[in-house]
Image (spheres, rainbow, N blue to C red):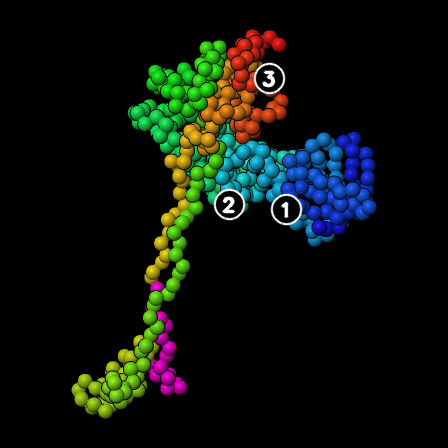
Amino acid sequence: MSTAQYRILSPANEKREDGQADVGIADGALVLAPSGESVLRVPFGHIASVTEPEPFTVRITLADGTAVELSRLGVMRTQLLAELRDGRGDAAAAAAAAVGEAAAFSCVTGGEPAEVRVYDDALLVLGAAGGERVSFSFVGAVQVRDYAVTVEVAGREPVILSRLGRRTGELAGLLAGRLAEARGRTAAFLGALLPGLDPMALRAAAGLLRDGVAVPARELDAIHPDLAATLIQVATLPARRDAVAELARRTDLAIGFRQLVSVRRPATGVTPWRDPAAAPHIGEHAGNQQSPGGAFQPGLAGLLSAGLMSGGPGGFGFGEGYGAFGAYWAFRALGAGMNPRGQQRPMAPRPDMTRGCLIPATEDLAALTTAGQDPTVLAFALGRGPGLVVFEVLNQAEPMTQVYRADGADGLAAVNRALDDAGFQVAGHEALAGQVPHDAQWPDRIAALLANRP
């Protein structure tokens, strides 16, 4: 907790309350504890924006327009801003159902400072006014120009990220790698789902069925006449197949798959580092009764003494002129001169070349499946009718069938992008026109909604 001066302002910017309070972050919320007043807890998901309207003043705007201004925070201001940024980022990632661990970058986008988080399946841009999810399935290309990274996105303006400094190339390389990995996972998943499909047809299908993208059945059947029907057969719960058949009869049906959890696996198999190198034992061979040795001291001094005593042609004895000292000066040139204290220079142990065994981080592609009680891939269908789009989950008992308002030729694609941006968490969507439970009346209710009857 940190003590601060606070003001609470209404959506009309009228002062409701002010004074001194303890401010802190706890359990995913901003906690404001005024002296003698009740505590205000604001979950990160209810914070619309965090700005600094004037120096050393933090303004936190709530979803309903109410604002909390904090000043006189002192050195805790920077920490509070960082905790608010991280907490809001985690809340936005959870709301968008982002998959995997994030790699974070600080940048500027739209003229405002922002934080960029790169997940397995999406790019999350967190600015003062909130977060924006950009699915890799809708990203066309990533370009670097003038120290800015431009991300082209289908159906909207490109996202331009600048002022990344030395991390410009790092972000561009990471995005390119994550895009390639996402496409590789799609190909591997479809290959396991459709083992009998030939490689070229599988490649074409994987190019269309990117993570979270619904593809019209007619486009899939253009690749192979039975492709759409086969996907529905292998990915749909038996109890849901009649409903899908009814949607296919009444709407233009599209099929899609969306990865729900990360299949990245951390590196394993590290063994502790040990140094098996033997310590040097040069100079430890002094003679004794068990191991008789020479009478001269070890090292160069002993060598010279032995040479002087030998006096032979191969020794260092004083013979003809200075030539007898040739071997001595050669040793000196190699840096082996005698220590002024008469001691041998210490020897270092030889380096250890043994390392622990490590299996690097990888992706468990076999874990991608639509089957089981907790499938890692969501199979879904979108049916386009007059002014409406029906969303149906194929491999889970819940949720209910969702019906959305969608006008125009690109209505299905617009609903698809909106669902993907929300992580396919369908509750409370602003374009929601109705929900139909899976009971005996389901066919009649769907028919009535598609006919625009109440």
Q: Is residue 351 positioned above or below 365 on the image?
A: below
Lateral position of residue 371 relative to residue 284, left or right = right
Q: Which residue is mark 3?
A: 434
Q: Which residue is mark 1?
A: 82
Q: Main secondary structure of the magenta part?
A: loop
Residue 120: percent from the left, percent from the top? 47, 37
Query: Within 10 Å of the Cα at label 1, are there few (<14), some (14-19), or many (20+) other Cα atoms?
Result: few
Q: Which residue is mark 2?
A: 167
Res 159 seen here: no
Q: Nearer the viewer, residue 160 or 224?
A: 224
Amino acid found under the numbered disc labelled 3? Gly
Q: Which residues are magenta?
A: 337-352
Residue 279: percent from the left, percent from the top? 35, 73
Lateral position of residue 70 relative to residue 259, left or right = right
Residue 345: percent from the left, percent from the top? 37, 79
Point out the frontmost of discs 2 and 1: 1
State which quarter of the image contains the C terminus: top right
Kindly state the secondary structure of the residue where label 2 is placed: helix
Query: Which residue is painted at 64% across and 44% down in the image?
Result: 27
Query: Which residue is painted at 30% across and 87% down in the image?
Result: 297
